[in-house]
Image (cartoon, coloured by chain):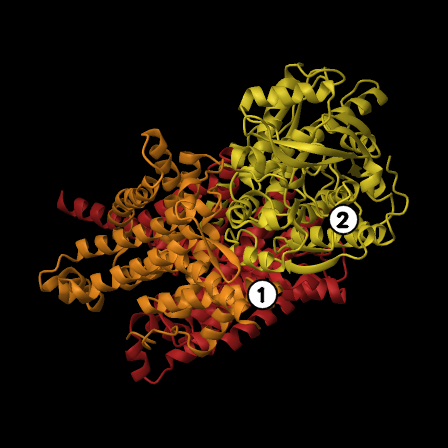
Chain colours: A red, B orange, C yellow
């Protein structure tokens, strides 16, 4: 195994242990964080998909499409076929969304920039329109899901949040480790080159089209995971999963995180959840103003996202160390 | 289907298309010049409607005849554009030029959230009504049905707006400069064009059109929170169908949406709103760049 | 990578700690009763339902805490406990509401949640409420599905569901002896509109078996423009046009239809239209048959409690109370009387949520809109009397309601254990009308 691969896997392992420990701490102290964290992980997974696209120079403003598809596919599996096993549902949701993304991607992979973003919004709104009309599966009200089980085990009420959180934590770490490994692989690095100069990549014999299809499918799989997870956490899904405002939140999380760091995406999802929830609590009449203002401030002052902020801190520390050294040498 | 049915579908469809065209024209103009898809466009429509409600209240206050409310609505739309366009374009969007286009998309999403609450803070949640202007033009009978003259007047207004923007772009010097900036902002700047002013101008006109549509639809609706969300989706569908950045595209898109919707009400009432998404989906599959957009698939 | 992961976790912990600091006053005190109040403070339903409801709730809580409400509600707060309310905006969809609900229960430790205008929110919240064992009162939403398709231990609805509104409208037409040969509907294209239309057509099939449906229109929620629909209705020219539209959608429809003469050609009936009267004022069309989803506002009965409430609200906000504040008051008074009943049973101690739930089950109490009885859904779903009237103008040109017909609760609500649609289709079996 390559040294960097080992390091990434090790980091993943440490992260799982820490997250699991944190889960048990919160179980006994401030239980509500477990649910908020689970939901943030669901959002974070979708945003991780957007970050994958961002590395190839694209942003989808319509990830609600795959988020919603995953939620509905697994939700229908649970209500119609009686499958309540959470890991199975996650796989179903992931595959359904990945498949949809694979089918759709050739349509949109020719486009770039704002056109790409817009076509994805349009597609997600088409899905929204279809679901609202389908009264057989709840129409605009959506439907309620049974409580998930875990490999045949049904946790008691007191531990239901914890069980789902632990599963979410494992999924989050596995997904981010896998994407990190992909980013660092040859294929993943080519994507970064696409971001810089597409023409050059084509001349070097790689296909930008293929990179885009691959990324959109990966983003679809991640979106499906996130949608399934949030469907299970909320116990209810509706067509708003595919509404453009939902997709806007995913992009916000991705931009807040930046495309450099994988783990930052979950932190930024958590920040969004907390800001939204506390502004709704303390400013119930102006929470949208606060949320929008927060968004603008973040984009203005942290354009590269939290990930870049760490980089900057690191650079700053290095610069200070260097300055101190020089000072020492001067005196 | 009888001729009378077709006639009603056409009249209703075109009335519906007219205000939608004015909104979409603003959206497409801003996109064409600044390459910004303004998600807050629906909110600007809402602000225009609110402003019209406030300004028309002044007409009876000053003892002016009701016809002046038409002027008041125009002034309201201008006022909205004069206040909001510089704040948004110079104060905010300018900071993101040259950066990722999607970042700007996200900024306009934030502006949408902010404006939702700002309108609430300024005007409250109670509804406003603009009753007077709708009585000014009387009723017109078309095919055994009565139509309100004011609604038909909106068709004229839409035509004037479309023509004015088209003439302004193609027949005036400033218009040609705008076209030059659309074509290549950097070269235009080298030729001495003050690109910043052109951006502000285009954004101003875009905001004005959104507010104008809001102002002149205010007499038909109950002006209250939540009217913006559907408008952005509809105008978005229009520009997707017609092609972003194209004036004839916005007109055709609006007509397609308006008439498809009217026909659905008569023939398949169950599909009324869905038909719009359906048309959009079909256009996306077969002509993703819109009916009127030159193919410009990838910039390299 | 290791580094960033650790930092991310540390920062996450810091954020969580910040959240906790803000959440601060978690532990509920003994002498206060904390409720979360969830209703629309923004979006389309804010103007017609959410804000008036919260205005009414705020006012009543203030009066209750001051002990200024007339008997039998003259004790301070809830059985001596001061009421503390946390308002939450219902806008943003069911998934957001599930999250806010959990935050209210798990983080803010509220003793009960009162809320939800949207049927979708009610359907989504109910299972979560039972899972968290959180006492929850649905105060407004209309769908019969909550307790007809499910059963919950900790969830109660203190207002009748929408079946009542549409049955009573049809009964009103019959009671006033109106001739109906043809009728049409214009309803919003979501569950509320479809359910209302279904109940109305089923009731008409019973009461006017000869009447024919000529048009069923379902414009999108929030469509705002109804020119085409009005043309379609005008061309068909049905005897009756039914609409369950509310808020801006209703007011826009009325404004657009008025100059085109729809009200001359057809008898328009509105199942939930009372809240359009104050905003439209003198521009409200005359001769429209409308309900308020209960005996609320201009349809409210002449009782001391109602006189107090109507006047108190009008003095405070300078507008008459419409349906939404009434339903909020009905929920608060129901909770108050159930808490006090539970306290009496356990010797004056602060009752647990289970004791309150037990007291609320099958409970009856007087509200400004009449007697509320928790008779359906195994004692979890209320029925109540209702009234329907016709708009007219008084000598000042202000809109009033005339020809008011009152319907007993058991005349327009299904009996226990029967689904609304089945009950209507079986010819309103067991209905007790005076």
SS state under label 2 = loop
Residue at mark 2: chain: A
Q: In the figure, B147 relative to C254: above or below?
A: below
Q: Nearer the viewer, residue B43 or A95?
A: B43
SS state under label 1 = helix
Q: At x 36% / y 40%, what residue is drawn?
A: B51
- Badge 1 crowding class, 10 Å Cα cut-off, few under 14, some 14 to 19, many 20 or more, is many
Kindly identify which numbered label has been placed on residue B266. Answer: 1
Q: At x 34% / y 85%, what residue is drawn?
A: A205
Q: At x 30% / y 58%, what residue is drawn?
A: B161
- The residue where tag 2 is placed is A156
Is any part of residue C87 visible from this angle? yes
Q: In the figure, B8 relative to A322: above or below?
A: below
Give the total of numbered labels: 2
Q: Nearer the viewer, residue B189 or B162?
A: B162
Of circles 1 and 2, which is in front? 1
Q: Nearer the viewer, residue C338 or A279?
A: C338
Residue at mark 1: chain: B
């Amino acid at each position: 195994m390559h040294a960097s691969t080992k390091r990434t896997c090790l980091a993943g392992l440490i992260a799982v242990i820490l997250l699991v420990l944190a889960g048990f701490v919160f179980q006994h102290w401030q239980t509500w964080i477990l649910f908020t964290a689970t939901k943030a992980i669901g959002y974070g997974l979708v945003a991780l998909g957007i970050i994958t696209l961002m590395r190839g120079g694209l942003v989808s403003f319509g990830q609600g499409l795959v988020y919603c598809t995953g939620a509905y596919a697994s939700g229908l599996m649970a209500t119609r076929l009686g499958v309540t096993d959470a890991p199975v549902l996650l796989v179903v949701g992931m595959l359904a969304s990945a498949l949809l993304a694979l089918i759709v991607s050739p349509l949109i992979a020719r486009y770039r920039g704002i056109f790409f973003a817009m076509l994805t919004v349009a597609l997600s709104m088409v899905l929204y329109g279809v679901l609202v009309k389908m009264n057989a599966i709840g129409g605009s009200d959506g439907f309620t899901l049974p409580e998930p089980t875990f490999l045949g085990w049904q946790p008691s009420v007191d531990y239901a949040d914890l069980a789902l959180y632990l599963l979410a934590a494992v999924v989050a770490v596995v997904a981010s480790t896998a994407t990190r490994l992909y980013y660092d692989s040859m294929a993943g690095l080519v994507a970064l080159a696409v971001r810089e100069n597409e023409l050059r990549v084509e001349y070097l014999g790689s296909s930008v089209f293929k990179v885009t299809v691959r990324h959109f499918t990966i983003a679809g799989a991640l979106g499906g995971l996130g949608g399934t997870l949030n469907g299970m956490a909320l116990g209810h899904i509706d067509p708003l999963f595919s509404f453009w405002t939902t997709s806007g939140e995913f992009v916000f999380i991705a931009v807040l995180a930046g495309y450099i760091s994988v783990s930052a995406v979950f932190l930024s999802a958590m920040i969004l959840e907390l800001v939204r929830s506390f502004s709704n609590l303390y400013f119930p009449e102006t929470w949208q103003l606060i949320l929008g203002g927060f968004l603008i401030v973040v984009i203005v002052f942290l354009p590269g996202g939290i990930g870049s902020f760490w980089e900057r801190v690191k650079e700053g520390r290095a610069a200070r160390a260097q300055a101190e050294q020089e000072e020492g040498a001067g005196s | 289907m009888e001729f009378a049915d077709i006639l009603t579908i056409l009249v209703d469809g075109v009335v519906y298309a007219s205000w939608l065209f004015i909104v979409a024209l603003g959206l497409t103009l801003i996109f064409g010049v600044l390459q910004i898809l303004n998600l807050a466009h629906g909110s600007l429509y809402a602000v225009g409607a609110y402003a019209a409600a406030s300004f028309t209240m002044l007409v009876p206050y000053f003892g002016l005849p009701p016809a002046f409310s038409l002027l008041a609505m125009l002034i309201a739309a201008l006022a909205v554009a004069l206040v909001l366009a510089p704040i948004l374009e110079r104060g905010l969007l300018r900071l993101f030029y040259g950066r990722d286009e999607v970042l700007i998309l996200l900024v306009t999403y934030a502006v949408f959230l902010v404006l939702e609450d700002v309108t609430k803070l300024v005007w409250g949640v109670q509804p406003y009504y603009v009753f007077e202007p709708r009585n000014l033009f009387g009723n017109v009978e078309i095919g055994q049905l009565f139509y309100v003259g004011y609604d038909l007047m909106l068709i004229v207004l839409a035509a004037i707006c479309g023509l004015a923007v088209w003439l302004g772009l193609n027949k005036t010097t400033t218009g040609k400069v705008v076209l030059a900036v659309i074509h290549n902002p950097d070269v235009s700047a080298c030729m001495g064009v003050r690109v910043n002013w052109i951006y502000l101008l285009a954004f101003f006109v875009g905001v004005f059109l959104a507010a104008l549509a809001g102002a002149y639809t205010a007499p038909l609706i109950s002006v209250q929170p939540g009217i913006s969300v559907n408008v952005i989706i509809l105008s978005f569908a229009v520009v997707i169908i017609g092609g972003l950045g194209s004036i004839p595209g916005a007109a055709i898109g609006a007509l397609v949406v308006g008439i498809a919707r009217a026909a659905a009400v008569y023939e398949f009432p169950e599909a009324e709103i869905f038909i719009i998404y359906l048309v959009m989906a079909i256009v996306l599959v077969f002509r993703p760049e819109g009916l009127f957009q030159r193919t410009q698939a990838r910039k390299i | 990578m290791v580094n960033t992961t650790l930092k991310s976790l540390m920062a996450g912990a810091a954020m969580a700690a910040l959240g906790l600091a803000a959440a601060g006053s978690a532990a509920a005190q003994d002498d206060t009763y904390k409720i979360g109040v969830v209703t629309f403070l923004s979006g389309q339903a804010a103007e017609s339902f959410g804000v008036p409801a919260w205005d009414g709730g705020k006012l009543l809580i203030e009066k209750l805490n001051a002990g200024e409400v007339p008997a039998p509600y003259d004790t301070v707060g809830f059985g001596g406990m001061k009421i503390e309310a946390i308002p939450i905006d219902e806008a943003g969809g069911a998934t957001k509401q599930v999250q806010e609900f959990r935050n209210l229960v798990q983080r803010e430790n509220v003793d009960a949640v009162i809320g939800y205008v949207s049927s979708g929110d009610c359907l989504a919240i109910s299972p979560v409420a039972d899972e968290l064992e959180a006492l929850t009162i649905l105060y407004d939403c209309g769908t019969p599905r909550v307790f007809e398709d499910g059963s919950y231990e900790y969830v109660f609805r203190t207002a009748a569901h929408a079946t009542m509104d549409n049955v009573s409208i049809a009964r009103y037409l019959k009671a006033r002896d109106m001739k109906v040969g043809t009728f049409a509907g214009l309803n919003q294209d979501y569950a509320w509109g479809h359910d209302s239309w279904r109940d109305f057509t089923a009731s008409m099939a019973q009461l006017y078996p000869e009447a024919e449906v000529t048009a069923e229109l379902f414009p999108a929620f929030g469509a705002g423009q109804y020119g085409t629909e009005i043309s379609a209705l005008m061309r068909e020219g049905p005897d009756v046009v039914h609409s369950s539209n509310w808020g801006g959608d209703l007011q826009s429809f009325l404004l657009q239809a008025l100059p085109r003469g729809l009200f001359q050609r057809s008898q328009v009936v509105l199942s939930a239209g009372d809240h359009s009267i104050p905003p439209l004022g003198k521009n409200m069309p005359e001769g429209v048959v409308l309900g308020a989803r209960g005996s609320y506002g201009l349809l409210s009965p002449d009782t001391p409690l109602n006189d107090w409430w109507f006047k108190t609200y009008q003095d405070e906000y300078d507008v008459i109370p419409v349906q939404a504040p009434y339903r909020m008051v009905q929920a608060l008074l129901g909770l108050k009387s159930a808490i006090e009943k539970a306290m009496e049973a356990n010797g004056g101690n602060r009752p647990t949520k289970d004791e309150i739930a037990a007291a609320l089950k099958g409970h009856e109490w007087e509200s400004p809109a009449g007697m509320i009885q928790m008779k359906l859904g195994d004692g979890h779903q209320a029925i109540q009397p209702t009234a329907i009237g016709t708009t007219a103008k008084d000598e000042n040109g202000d809109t009033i309601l005339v020809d008011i017909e009152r319907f007993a609760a058991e005349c327009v609500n299904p009996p226990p254990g029967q689904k609304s649609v089945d009950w209507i289709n079986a010819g309103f079996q067991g209905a007790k009308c005076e």
